[in-house]
Image (cartoon, rainbow, N blue to C red):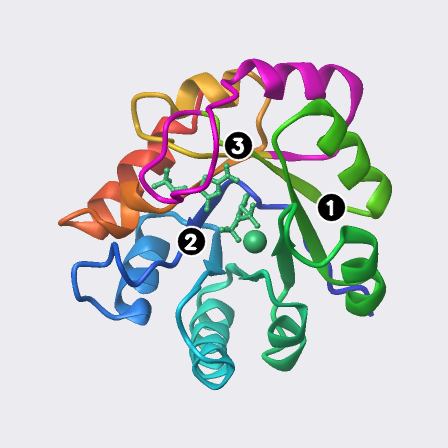
Amino acid sequence: MNRKVLSNLAFHVLTDREWSRGRSMLEVASAAIDGGATVIQLRDKMSSTRTLIEEGHALRELTRERGVLLIVNDRVDVALAVDADGVHVGQDDMPGDLARKLLGPNRILGISAGSMEEAVAAIVAGADYLGIGPIYATRGKADAGEPVGPGLIAEICKRYTTPLVAIGGITTENAGEVMQAGAAGIAVITAVVNAEDVYLAAHQLARALIV
Ligand SMILES: Cc1ncc(COP(=O)(O)OP(=O)(O)O)c(N)n1
Ligand SMILES: Cc1nc(C(=O)O)sc1CCOP(=O)(O)O
Ligand SMILES: [Mg+2]
């Protein structure tokens, strides 16, 4: 059975303990889904593999119940272990072609790109979507590098049809701009995870995507 469902890559919320104001990953993810998140990405750079798997199982149950996608950041093994819908790898992670080989054809593979060259390589490697960023200055990733701006999205869109997900400094103020540039969706950490009211923040971002 082909389980890959790419229909709703519009609104990724990435988990992050440090920005969660002490709230649990499940509480934040649940409120984000209530507000309109369509993808939850398990991103936890600090925990042991054992903890990641526990978090992954819990998020798998939640996301399955609520009909949204679960993507695991960085770790193909964890994605397979918890039966996630897919994995996201960056330029310093497992190479995309190898991730694709291990995942098989039926799970979603997202690959980061911060230039046209990286985008082309990611498409050749078998990406189902590209995470393009950082689009704007970001608080969520210390080593994200210089912002590339929404222009890169427009450039890639002119040449390729692979869905593009804008990441890095996305807020309600600029989400419309990246969608107009041709993005299929956005991915955020702080705008949702660090919000006092996670539901409201997600709801407002979801509305800002409609351009
Ligand atoms: C949707 C999406 N796009 C980009 C990234 C960044 O991945 P990466 O460059 O590997 O950085 P880390 O997230 O691992 O710090 C992402 N996670 N999701
Ligand atoms: C995880 C991540 N990846 C990026 C990239 O450019 O690839 S920027 C980023 C952090 C996103 O956090 P915020 O929404 O708070 O800006
Ligand atoms: Mg990574």
At a point 83% along the width and 54% down the height, the residue shown is: 97
Q: Is mark 2 within 8 Å of ligand 2?
A: yes
Q: Position of residue 125 (x, y in %)?
A: 83, 46
* Alpha carbon separation for disc pair 1 and 3: 16 Å
Relative horizontal placement of residue 42, taking residue 195 as reference (left or right): right
Amino acid type, residue under disc 3 in the picture? Gly
The x, y position of residue 89, in whole percent, is 64, 53
Region rendered in magenta: 136-164
Q: In this rendering, is residue 136 above or below 181?
A: below
Ligand 2 contact, mark 3 (Cβ < 8 Å) = yes
Question: Callout 3: helix, strand or loop?
Answer: loop
Give the quadrant of the C terminus: top left
- Cα distance in 3D space between marks 2 and 1: 18 Å
Q: Main secondary structure of the magenta part?
A: loop
Marks 3 and 2, the one that precedes in the sequence: 2
Residue 164 image point, x, y percent: 63, 33
Mark 2 lies on residue:
14
Kind of element beneath mark 2:
strand
Mark 2 or mark 1: name the one nearer the start of the chain.
2
Q: CA distance from mark 3 to mark 2?
A: 14 Å
The residue depicted at 36 percent of the width and 47 percent of the height is 189
Does the stretch in magenta take in 148? yes
Type of the residue with mark 1 = Asp
Q: Residues within 10 Å of mark 2 (few under 14, many from 20)?
A: many
Residue linked to disc 1: 128
From the viewer's perspective, is residue 50 above or below residue 157?
Answer: below
